[in-house]
Image (cartoon, rainbow, N blue to C red):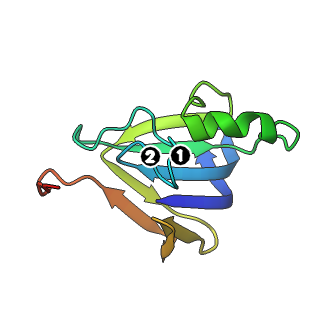
Amino acid sequence: MLLYGIVKKFTPHGCTKILLFAIANGTYYGGGMNVNPNGSIDDGYIDAILITPVPRFKFPFLFWKFVSGKYLDLPYVKAYRCKKVKIHSDESLPVNGDGDIIATTPVQFSVSDHGILVFC
């Protein structure tokens, strides 16, 4: 799941603008982008990656870090391990899942303890 645009994250200290908010269970998406380098499909958690706006002049230099999964140490990035994620916004925002708009906010994601085993 990918939510992008300017969203406000409410914190105990007020609100913060968000550039991108990704919910991931695995490690890769979007043709090989390592969006969640610490992800695991069998650890019982989903990972929430929050990126605050990056100054435009820095973006070209930092984009490769996002693609390669070496961005978690940047001051613009926060990563959370969660059992459940709820997203609310003042206005309805599109939620992108696997390249398609799958919902609009508000939305909720959670991990099931009773998943299925798939053989490939």
Image x and y of residue 31, in percent: 51, 54
Foreground pick, 17 / 23: 23
Q: Quadrant of the C terminus?
A: bottom left
- Pointer 2 or 1: first along the chain: 2
Mark 2, residue position: 28
| Residue shown at the point (54%, 34%) measured from the top left | 69
| Residue shown at the point (63%, 43%) measured from the top left | 51
Q: Amino acid at mark 1?
A: Met
Taking the view exactly as shown, the residue that stands out farthest to the front is 120
Foreground pick, 16 / 13: 16
Disc 2 element? loop
| Mark 1 neighbour density, 10 Å: few (under 14) some (14–19) many (20 or more) | some
**Between marks 2 and 1, how big is the CA–CA gap?**
5 Å
**Tags 2 and 1 in contact by the CB under 8 Å rule?**
yes
Residue 57 visible in the current orientation: yes
Disc 1 element? loop
**Height in image: 7 above or below 16?**
below
Taking the view exactly as shown, the residue that stands out farthest to the right is 57
